[in-house]
Amino acid sequence: MVKVVKFGGSSLASAEQFKKVADIIKADEARRYVVPSAPGKRFSDDTKVTDMLYSCYDRAAKGKNFDAEFDAIKQRYYEIIEGLGLTISLEDEFATIRACFIGKAGRDYAASRGEYLNGIVLANYLGYDFIDSADVIFFDDSGKFSSKKTYEILSDRLEGCERAVIPGFYGSMPNDTIKTFSRGGSDVTGSIVAASCNADIYENWTDVSGFLIADPRIIENPEPIKIITYKELRELAYMGAGVLHEDSIFPVRKAGIPINIRNTNKPDDFGTMIVESTSQRPEYTITGIAGKKGFTSISIEKDMMNSELGFGRKVLEAFEKNGISFEHMPSGIDTMTVIVHQAEFEQAEQEVLASIHRNCKPDSIVIETGLALIAIVGRGMRATRGTAGKIFSALSDSKVNVNMIDQGSSELNIIVGINEEDFDTAMNSIYNAFVEKK
Ligand code: ASP
């Protein structure tokens, strides 16, 4: 059995956290390949090493003195090294990095050093091999992840290596410069490493015990989600439920490897298992609820719209031509509503409206802003009668007016549009309808 384990920045922010990480790794023989992030925040006002590197490099690139910023970064690593009682020195590494900062090696190079150095320290502490991701993870000339080359070289390398630390977040370009994934990208590296060695599982260790049924900033103490499918996760993530980098799903999903989100500070918690499919029904019919504010609806009305060929296309073309993607499109016989992100729509609002007027000659266009969308997601809804009824009675009991309803044809989700002011009330009433009254 092979497990790939990725540890996030807060799991590796201090010597104390490093010790927890080593205990977790040592507790299971199968945890052979380890992907670390850079040291993250030790307390809420702290600064992540990645951010320290970006700002330090920005000073260097402008030709300003960056000694103080550079020393503060060194200090973070030396604190960890001393706290663990290690004898390695990173002085040569720091000298190289300093020279590269002066030589303007690039922001990506700078940021990647956080993971690189943390990888060296962790490998030393665990007694594992260190594999520099620049030698095994590749991007093409356009900066896209180069999967074929990576899988070939990385699989080979892992095959010849019993246990190794492979730093997250970066790889190299065809011209040998360093490139990073977008922020939070160590999750992606972990997924690529798992796919490369055909791991049985990809464990992603962070500072929460997996996904929760709803956002804890809105619902008090929400229940955790034990098992979720990739499709459900996609729906919830789209509505803002974060934890995992979006691009980290693809490599493991394609290889049929499940992801287990775990909590470094509570290693006994089961966490959330993310799987392709499962026979296990979710505990509460719904798997999760997530929502976002900041939407606008544009309702276009025209008598006999239903028989006018090409009407919908012309409406959508007005959005497309102005670079605005639409989120939902509920429609009636003579009305069609397009829901968009307010922030995006604002930029080209008048152009879009003029274009609809010109091409579609509608009877009226009504714009409503301040709309929030809530997605109620669950593979269990398909087989359960009355889910929609339960949602709408909960909303009506708590006096929330529903502006829009959209049910995906897969019966995996129901989306309701409400006024932003009702957001918290709506979330709570839906949550309570399914979870507490079980
Ligand atoms: N250290 C990087 C960041 O802060 C990448 C990661 O942690 O995944 O975004």
Image (spheres, helix red, strand yellow):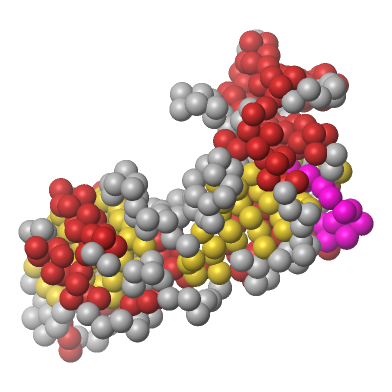
Q: Residue at x 59, y 24 (%)?
A: 52
Q: Is residue 220 left or right of residue 18?
A: left
Q: Is-magenta flag for residue 237? A: no
Q: Residue at x 28, y 75 (%)?
A: 407
Q: Residue furthest bottom?
A: 307
Q: Residue at x 46, y 24 (%)?
A: 45
Q: Please name whichever residue, 299 or 256, is drawn nearer the observer in this view of the structure.
A: 256
Specify the segment rendered in magenta: 153-172
Q: Is residue 195 left or right of residue 325?
A: right
Q: Can residue 258 be seen in the rendering of this structure? A: yes
Residue 427 appears in which quarter of the rendering?
bottom left
Give percent across and percent down for residue 67: 67, 11
Residue 384 appears in which quarter of the rendering?
bottom left
Q: Please name whichever residue, 239 or 319, is drawn nearer the observer in this view of the structure.
A: 239
Q: Is-magenta flag for residue 159? A: yes
Q: Can residue 315 be seen in the rendering of this structure? A: no
Quick one: quadrant of the C terminus?
bottom left
Give percent across and percent down for residue 93: 82, 25
Give percent across and percent down for residue 84: 74, 25
Q: Residue at x 29, y 63 (%)?
A: 435
Picture layout, residue 242 above or below residue 285: above
Give percent across and percent down for residue 231: 47, 70
Q: Please name whichever residue, 361 or 247, is drawn nearer the observer in this view of the structure.
A: 247
Picture layout, residue 274 above or below residue 123: below
